[in-house]
Amino acid sequence: MPKGLGDIMKQMQKMQIKMEEIQKELENKRVEGTSGGGMVRVIANGKQEILEIKIDPEVVNKEDVEMLEDLVLAAVNQAKEKAQEVQTEEMSKLTGGLKIPGMPF
């Protein structure tokens, strides 16, 4: 194997190890999305997985279920957006800001 190709393979292996470390870190990061002035809170991790949904009992009104659905949806979307930002930030540390096809961000 030519020396240059061997160096590239070593760099790719290092990058793979670092990416696995970042994925573990993302799993442990927490972001929060809220709506209704904090009446609905959604906690997600850096991998965009929803971990918790908290709903203040005051916002529960059987006469207006649609409003609660909207609040939950807004909080979930905000949490996912924040998780995406965290993921992009962490992955850009690995790639130096380059957009590499096949890299999750």
Image (tube, rainbow, N blue to C red):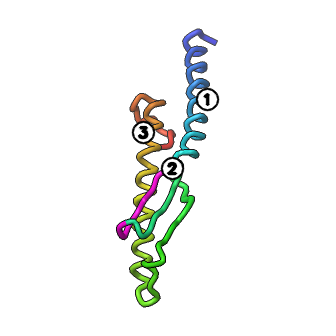
User: Where is residue 62 shown, x and y percent of the image?
Assistant: 46, 88
Which amino acid, mark 1? Answer: Ile
**The magenta segment:** 30-37
Left or right: 47 as drawn, with respect to 98: right
Q: Which mark identifies residue 17?
A: 1
Residue lying at the far left of the rendered structure: 37
2 or 3: mark nearer the eye: 2
Disc on res. 33: none
Q: Which residue is mark 2?
A: 30
User: What residue is at 39 percent from the left and 65 percent from the top?
Assistant: 38
The one nearer the camera, 102 or 47, is 47
Amino acid type, residue under disc 2 in the picture: Arg
Label 1 and label 2: CA atoms lie apart by 22 Å
Q: Quadrant of the N terminus?
A: top right
In the image, residue 9 above or below residue 82: above
Q: Secondary structure at mark 3?
A: helix
